Image: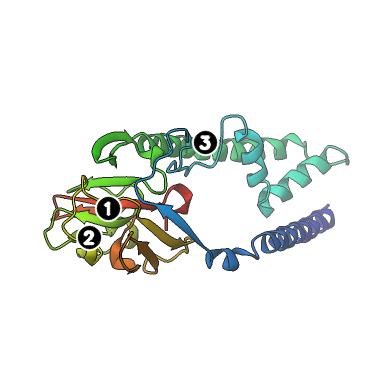
Amino acid sequence: MKQCHVLIYNFTQWLCQTVASICHLIFFCCSGNKVHSASETRTVEVGFIDPNDKKKHNKIKTSKYSLLLFIPKNLSEQFRRIVNFYFLVVTLISFFIDSPVSPFTSVLPLSFVVLVTAVKQGFEDFLRHKEDKKVNNQIVEIVHKGVIKQVANSSIAPGTLVRVKRGKEVPADLVLLCSADPKGKCFVTTANLDGETNLKTLRVPPPIVGYTHDIIPQGMQIDIPNPIADLYTFYGRLNIPGQDTIILSPENLMLRGSRVKNTEWAIGCAVYTGKLNL
């Protein structure tokens, strides 16, 4: 019986390693073009809102499970663990071989562990669903045709002009275009992103310093690259009709999750939303 357990354990280890290698190979093949795609650029039209676009561009989802797929997905994740998979194989084999020990002595502990883990992970995911809903339905201010409007956070799309007041959290990655500060400065904290509590100074691009939401130049466009996973790397170009192109840098970008401080309000154009946030 002991030799049988050793053989089962060795086979389980080999099977799990083989499956992991295959999954890693598939993931590598599918994601091999990410570096190339990150170098491409796209254009965002400042202030443009498509009235027919009902997509929730800025919707976030941190939850892992849906109600329909919770049981199969959770069981699949649990039995990917070598220990759980090993005891599952031993339990199944014990039903087909003569053993002095009842198979139910293996079934009951395994079932208890799986059930407790499923309940714990299900409750944690339920809390994530609640938090996602709260964030997505949060009311934010946008500027449309010179008028301040209130909309749900999830409806922010690339190109939307968003106004963030003092003490409020930035709802998407925004290129700073207006500030209540006469010199075009905006102070933010990024404690939620990198743990730093010191104020960071952001700046409005020089040619449009002093503009307000009702006199923002029409027809502006922002050229940006696809997002990369680096909070401190950003570049782009701001194209203003009749003026030279302006180079954008990290000091022109308000990151999602940062908080406006010591500035009455700031207005920025959403460039990265939802899953595309840096």
Q: Is residue 116 visible?
A: yes
* Dots 1, 2 in contact, CB < 8 A: yes
Q: Where does the image place residue 123, in percent across and percent down from the top left?
A: 47, 35
Amino acid on which disc 2 is placed: Ile
Front residue of 162/76: it is 162
Which secondary structure, mark 1? Answer: loop
Tag 1 residue: 217
Front residue of 46/81: it is 46
Earlier residue among tags 2 and 3? 3
Tag 3 residue: 122
Q: Where does the image place residue 209, in percent across and percent down from the top left?
A: 19, 61
Tag 2 residue: 208
In-image side of 166 versus 243 (left or right):
left
Residue at the spot 79% in from the left edge and 54% down from the top edge: 5
Which secondary structure, mark 3? Answer: helix
Amino acid on which disc 1 is placed: Pro
